[in-house]
Image (cartoon, rainbow, N blue to C red):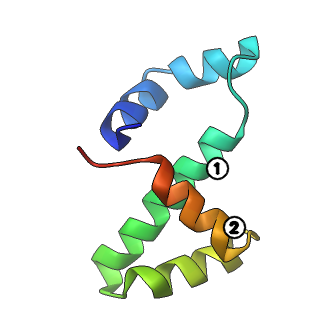
Amino acid sequence: MNINLANSLFNEGIFSEMYKAGFITDKIFTYREMYLWVYAQMKTRGITKHQAVLEAGGKFNRDERTVWRALNCFDEK
């Protein structure tokens, strides 16, 4: 899924409505948050993607593979 589309759906409340209706799980919210956090850390702190993923694992209390999975769910195209 395109991250810009996901952000639009989130901002318009569509993801929330789909979640309430049972069409999607809360994983989409967590994955989006991890994706945004990792790229924000890379941009603001100038750290590598790998370092940001390691730190995100601790911040979100998830393993490294889950963070990579979240990043792979979205693209920037």
Image location (x, y in percent) of residue 72: 47, 55
Image location (x, y in percent) of residue 53: 53, 77
Amino acid on which disc 2 is placed: Phe
Between the C-alphas of marks 2 and 1, the distance is: 9 Å
Residue at x 44%, y 57% (from the top left corner): 36
Amino acid on which disc 1 is placed: Thr
Image location (x, y in percent) of residue 63: 73, 73
Residue at x 56%, y 56% (from the top left corner): 70
Q: Quadrant of residue 11?
A: top left
- Judging from the image, what secondary structure is the residue with disc 2 in? loop
Work out whether 71 lies above or below 62: above
Residue at x 35%, y 38% (from the top left corner): 2
Image quarter (top left, top right, bottom left or bottom right) of the N terminus: top left
Residue for badge 2:
60
Residue for badge 1:
30
- Judging from the image, what secondary structure is the residue with disc 1 in? helix
Residue at x 74%, y 69% (from the top left corner): 62
43 vs 40, left or right, is: left
Viewer-proximal residue, 61 or 77? Answer: 77
Label 2 close to label 1 by CB (< 8 Å)? yes
